[in-house]
Image (spheres, rainbow, N blue to C red):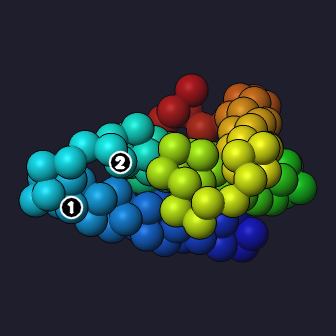
Amino acid sequence: MLQQTWSIRLIRISAIFGLIGAVLGSHMAGSGSYGFRPIHAHILLVGWLSVFAWGAFYRIFKVRASKLITAHGWTGIIGSIGLTAGMWLQFMEPFQINPTISLIFYIVGGSILLISFALFIVVTFFIEKDEKFV
């Protein structure tokens, strides 16, 4: 079932974000340098928490709109990666790329993530009625 595929896909992606966030937190604590703090926070809140919650939602509820699930899943993954990678490129300047390019990457990633959050609101209106949850 498509919904179960998206559930485990989102949970696996969130686990990767969780590991990256934990490694960044460990690095900051060990080095005493907190330059990664905003990136660390967004990786854990957007990548770990939000993506995991979406995966759990798809495991718990049956959604009647498969194309909407797919659109939400892809925008969630692309937006989470885009926002956090864009923040990293913008604030840490690891490759000394043109600041305009890193800003565009950051803005586009964040905008795709906003679309994902809006799509998730719509998804919640397409669940099958279950007396346990409604």
Q: Which residue is mark 1?
A: 27
| Vertical comparison of 128 with 12: above or below | above
Q: Where in the figure is residue 4, as x and y percent of width and height? A: 62, 68
Report which quarter residue 10 is drawn in: bottom right
Report which quarter residue 77 is drawn in: bottom right
Check disc 2 and give the amino acid type.
Phe
Residue at image point 65% right, 72% down: 5
Residue at image point 72% right, 73% down: 1
| Vertical comparison of 8 with 119: above or below | below
Which of 40/9 is in front? 40
Q: In the drawing, what numbered circle is on residue 106?
A: none
Q: In the drawing, what numbered circle is on residue 36?
A: 2
Residue occupying the far right of the picture: 67
Q: Where in the figure is residue 31, as x and y percent of width and height? A: 14, 57
Q: Where in the figure is residue 18, as x and y percent of width and height? A: 36, 60
Residue 27 visible: yes
Disc 1 crowd rating (10 Å Cα; few below 14, some 14-19, many 20+) is: some
| Vertical comparison of 103 with 80: above or below | above
**Given contact means CB atoms under 8 Å apart, are the residues at marks 1 and 2 in contact?**
yes
Check disc 1 and give the amino acid type.
His
Disc 2 crowd rating (10 Å Cα; few below 14, some 14-19, many 20+) is: some
